[in-house]
Image (cartoon, rainbow, N blue to C red):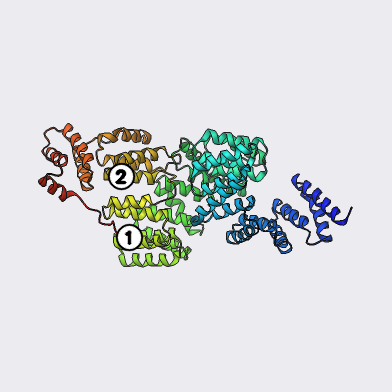
Amino acid sequence: MTDEDALRATVERAAALIRLERYAEAEPMLRRVLASEPGHYGGLANLAWLLDLADRLDEALETARQLITHWPNETEGFYRAALILKQGKELDEALALLERALQIEPDEGRILRLCAQVLGKYPGRRVEALAMADRAIEVDPQVGDSFQARAMVLVDEYRWREAETAMAEALRLEPMNTTFLVQAGIVKLRLGAIDRARDAFTSALRLKPKPYRVREVLDTLETNGLPAPLLDVYTLGCQALDIPDLGTPGTAGTDPELLRKQARIAGSMWRAAVYNHAWSKDSRDRCRELASALMAADPTLPPARLLAAEIASDDDRYEDLLALAEPLIAEGEATRDLFRWAVYGLEHLDRLDEALEIAAEGCRRFPDSSESVSLKGRILAELGRREEAVAAAERAVELAGDDPGALTSAANVYKRLKMNDEAKEAYKAILRVAPKQTTTLFQLGSLYMLAYQDHRAAERLIQRIELPDVGGDRTAVLGQIRFQLGKWDQAMADFEKALATPMRDPVTVPGIIIGLQLFGPPKRFQPLLDKSVEIRAAGPGEPVTIDKLRLAAFTLIKYGALAEAQEVLAQILELDPENHEATIMAKVVADPDEPEHAEAIAVVFTPDPHDDEL
C-alpha cells in the first residue's frame, strides 16, 4: 500500500467514526494525516466537518479556511466555512464565500440550498432566495433538503401554507428525517394545526434526535405559549434531555439559575399567548401561576419581577404594574420594555407628568435608543409641549439611522401632534428607502384614513404590504376600509379571513365589532357581527339604530357606492317606513343620472384627493 493509499484509508476510517459521533477517536487519526501532509484534502475536509459537529466552531472555521487556501478550486472549503459563518450570523461573509463556490460549480445542490437560506435572511433578497431554492429542486429533485431550503425561505416570509407544502414534499422523500419532522411541526403549529404539529413532534422525538433538535422542539413550544394539547410532548422533550420541566410551577425550586430560565420560558409563553388560540386562556393562566411561584421562590429576582410587570401591563392592572416597575427602575434593573409599559400605564391613568419623568429616565438609561426618545416625544405631545415633542422626534430620527421601525416610531410623534402633513412626509420618506416596510405602510394608511378621511388611499397602501397578516388585525382594518368604500364582497372576505387567522391578535375581534356596530351594521353583515360578538363573549351586541344606518348611507354615497347605500336606505325604511330623509335619499340613489339627483350626490361624493401621491 502506498503512502497515499494509507492516508486515504485512515481518512475513510475517521469519516466512519465521525458518522458514529465518535469524535474523540476520529480526531487524532485526522491530525496524524495532516501532520504527514498538511494540505491533504480529505484530512482537512473531514476535520472541518468533525469540529463543526463538535460545536468547536472557531477551530472548524480556521480549518475550512485552510482547505480554501490549499484547494481554491474545490467547493468544500467554501461550503463548510459559509455554513459555520451562517450559524454565527455572519451573513455577508457567508454569502461572499457561497458566491465564489457557485462560480466554481454553478449547479451544486448543497451550495444552492445554503445560498437560498442565507439570502432568505435578507428581507430585500427573498425573491432571489426563492429562485435559488427552486434551482436546487431542479438540480436535486430527489433530495429532501432542496424542499426544506424552499420551506425555510417561505417561513422567513411568513408564508406558512406554502412552507407546509414544501416540508410535506421533503418528508415524502425522507419520512424518518428528524430535522424535517421538527421543522414541519413548527410550520403546522404556526398554522394552528395543533394535532398535526403534535404528530410531527412526537414522531421526531420517538426517533431519538440529537439534543439540539430536541431543544428546537422545546423552544418552539415555549415561543408558542406551551399549548395545553402539547404539554406531554414538552415533557417528553425535557425527559429526553434530562432537564426539569420548567413549564410547570415549582419545578425550579429555589435554584437561582433555574428560576431565571423558568422566568425566560414563562415570558416567552406569555408573549405567545396574547393570541386568541383555543389554548390561549390556559397558557396565560399557567403563566400567571408560574409568575406567582417565581415571586414566592425569590421575590427579589429581577426576571420574575419583570415578568410580573409585563403580565400586569397586559392585564391593564396599571397600579400593580407601577408598584413593580418603580423599584426595578430605581435598582437599575429596568429594560426598555419596562420603561415603555410604565409610561403607557401612567398615560392610561392620566398621570402624564409622571409618565414624562419615567420616559426621561428611560432616555438617560438608554441614550442611544431612538425608541426611548420617541416614547418621550409621545408624552410631550400628549402634554401639548409641541416644540419639545418636535425636537424629540427630530432627535429620534437622528438616532434611528436607517432602521425603518425606529423611524416610524419617530414619525408617529408627528401624528400624535396632529401635524398630519409632517407625519405624512416622514412616512413617505421612510417608504422611499424601504418601500415594503409593513409598519410604515400601515401607519401611513391609517393616517390617510383617520386624518384625511381618504379610505381609497388607505386601501391602496395597506394592499401594498407583502408580509402575511399573522394576527388578522391588519386584514380586519382592510375589511373596515372596504366596508365603508362599498366593496362589500371583499370586506366580508377580509373579515372572515381575519376571524379564521390561527394566530389571531386580541384586538382583531373587538376591532371588527366596533367597526360594524358604528354603521349599524347593514343586514348583510349582521351574521358576521353576531359571530364576532359570540367569539368575544362580552355580552350582547349593541342594537341597530337608524342613526347608525344613516351614517353608513352617507359614507357609502361619499365613496360612490350607490347600490350599497340603497341597500342601507331600504333597511332604514324597514325600521321606519315614514322616514322622510331615507325616502328622499332612496329616490336619489335609485336614479343618480337625473340632474337634481346628480347635484345632490355631488354634494356628498368626495373625489380621490391623493390619487397622484401614491
Residue in view at x 29 percent, y 62 percent: 421
Quadrant assignment, res 202: top right
Numbered disc 1: secondary structure? helix
Distance, label 2 to label 1, CA atoms, is 22 Å
Residue behind mark 2? 482
| Front in this rendered view, residue 441 or 114 | 114
Q: State the count of labels.
A: 2
Vertical placement of residue 186 versus 34, above or below: above
| Front in this rendered view, residue 181 or 340 | 181
Q: In the rendered structure, which disc, 2 or 1, sits on the residue that comes first in sequence?
A: 1
Residue 321, given in percent of the width and then of the height, sits at 43, 50
Which of the image's four quarters has the C terminus? bottom left
Residue 260 as seen in the image, left or right of residue 463: right
* Residue type for callout 2: Arg
Residue 216, given in percent of the width and then of the height, sits at 60, 44
Vertical placement of residue 153 versus 205, above or below: below
Quadrant assignment, res 482: top left
Residue 546 as seen in the image, left or right of residue 313: left
Residue 234, given in percent of the width and then of the height, sits at 59, 38
Q: Residues within 10 Å of mark 2 (few under 14, many from 20)?
A: many
Residue 334 visible in rendering: no
For marks 2 and 1, give the one nearer the viewer. 2
Residue in view at x 14 percent, y 44 percent: 593
Q: Residues within 10 Å of mark 1 (few under 14, many from 20)?
A: some
Residue 109 visible in rendering: yes
Residue in view at x 77 percent, y 55 percent: 42
| Front in this rendered view, residue 102 or 523 | 102
Vertical placement of residue 537 versus 411, above or below: above
Residue 41, given in percent of the width and then of the height, sits at 76, 57
Numbered disc 2: secondary structure? helix
Image disc number at residue 424: 1
